[in-house]
Image: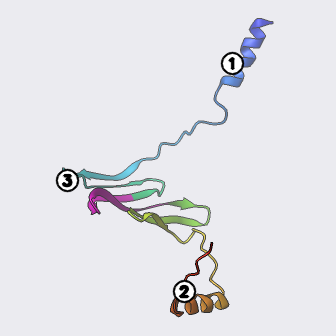
Amino acid sequence: MVLVCMLIAAAFAAPQGQAPTETVPIVRQDSQVNGDGSYQYSFETGNGISADQKGDLKKVGDVEAIEVSGQFQYPGENGNIQLTYVADENGYQPQGAHLPTAPPVPEPIQKALAYLATAPPQPEQNSQ
């Protein structure tokens, strides 16, 4: 009985599914790291995946930070998926045709915002 339980436990512990049998070649790979902290890299695989990125040292206020920009793409079900991005003091800013976008602001709201932007400031009221 113990032997049967051990065999069942070993069967459940074994990896499930098929292991990948195809090796994907790297067809291009470049990288460079500079002494000033800047860098760049790029690669492309045999199955259509590619990426490029570069980072440069930038002064933001009193602090030095790395500003990163790049792009990557990979094959999707409906064609290639491509994304470009910048990461800097304003955060991560991706751009791609497959990313969702906000709906347009309705015209009455746009008019109200334009009016509020040009309206004179209202006097503050003291509340007690």
Residue linked to disc 3: 36
The magenta stretch is: 52-73
N-term mark: 1 or 3 = 1
Q: Nearer the viewer, residue 40 or 128?
A: 128
Q: Which residue appears at 54% of the width and 86% of the height?
A: 123
* Helix, strand or loop for disc 3: loop
Of tags 1 and 3, which is closer to the observer?
A: 3
Image quadrant holding the N terminus, namely: top right
Q: Which mark is on residue 123? A: 2
Crowding around mark 3 (Cα neighbors within 10 Å: few <14, some 14 to 19, many 20+) is: few
Contact (Cβ within 8 Å) of mark 2 with mark 3: no
Asked if residue 102 lies in the magenta stretch, the reply is no
Asked if residue 68 lies in the magenta stretch, the reply is yes
Mark 2: amino acid: Pro
Residue linked to disc 1: 10
Of tags 2 and 3, which is closer to the observer?
A: 2
Crowding around mark 1 (Cα neighbors within 10 Å: few <14, some 14 to 19, many 20+) is: few
Q: Nearer the viewer, residue 84 or 106?
A: 106
* Helix, strand or loop for disc 2: loop
Image quadrant holding the C terminus, namely: bottom right
Mark 3: amino acid: Asp
* Vertical arrangement, residue 4 with respect to residue 52, above or below: above
Side of 19 relative to 5 (left or right):
left
